[in-house]
Image (cartoon, rainbow, N blue to C red):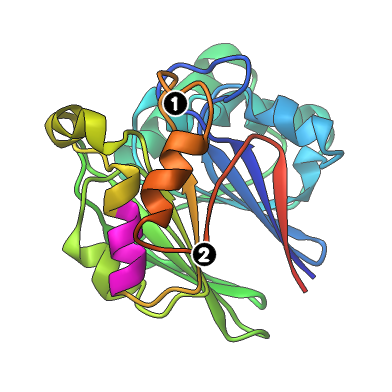
Amino acid sequence: MIKIHFLGTGAGAPTASRWASSLLISIGSSNYLFDCGEGCQLRLSSLGISPLKITSIFITHGHGDHVLGVPPLVESMSHHGRKSPLYIVAPNIIANMIEEVIRTTSRGVGFEILYKSPEEGYGDSNIDVKAFRTCHSSESWGYRVEIKKRKLVICYSGDTGPCKTIAEECYGAYILIHEATFTLENAADAKESMHSTAYDAAKLAQAVNVKYLYLTHISSRYKDQWTILKEARSVFSNVRVAEDLMVTYII
């Protein structure tokens, strides 16, 4: 069984209802973490998922709400006696940050961390992951995850404005997980900060013929999901607004 755990679905600073960005794809006993914002390991704990069970971590970009949960998660892995290697796929500047925090705050970890750049991609017996550049205010990557045994694709946009590379790499995906930081009412803010509106994400999902669209990275200015959902569904019907601790099953 494949499960997608939405650990944190907020944008920028965490709130009581939406924590910083983090997403986990579980395939059998293997767990793949995409982004790891502040509080990520607490969300994992609340779902009963041990940090020892994380196979690989994929980081989209260096903004704090996507990466500041990595060093404490790695330290917890060490405290729990992890011995198996951990893969971290991330831009070099993020790998350097993680190593510096570990060096500064601990005596090191008892397992090997294997860093890979997004350009290198990642593959194992469960998945093949291809990274693609997105359109954000810093170096930012999305990830195309092909589930080998099911021959289906899950795409994760990370932070981005409307971007041609997502359309190219995610055409026909089973699930597109796309940021929707704003609604059209705040389209100027979205453009200035290189984020997307719910309408932008829905138009993309329609254009590239995905089966399901999940919206995440929601600004704290929206106190409920209905405005976002209504805007997206005016274009694309198979859409959900992700919430923290929501789990989607692919049977």
Q: CA distance from mark 2 to mark 1?
A: 28 Å
Instruction: Give whichever of 26, 92 is nearer the camera.
Output: 26
Secondary structure beneath label 1: helix
Residue 52 against residue 143 in the figure, above or below: above
In the image, residue 111 lies at what x, y percent?
A: 69, 43
In the image, residue 188 lies at what x, y percent?
A: 13, 30
Residue 57 against residue 1 in the figure, above or below: above
Q: Is residue 59 visible?
A: no
Question: Which residue is denoted by mark 1 in the rendering?
Answer: 65
90 lies left or right of 140: right
Would residue 157 be counted in the magenta stretch?
no
Question: Which residue is denoted by mark 2 in the rendering?
Answer: 238
Residue occupying the point 39% across, 51% down: 232
Instruction: Give whichever of 158, 237 is nearer the camera.
Output: 237
- Main SS of the magenta part reads helix
In the image, residue 59 lies at what x, y percent?
A: 44, 44
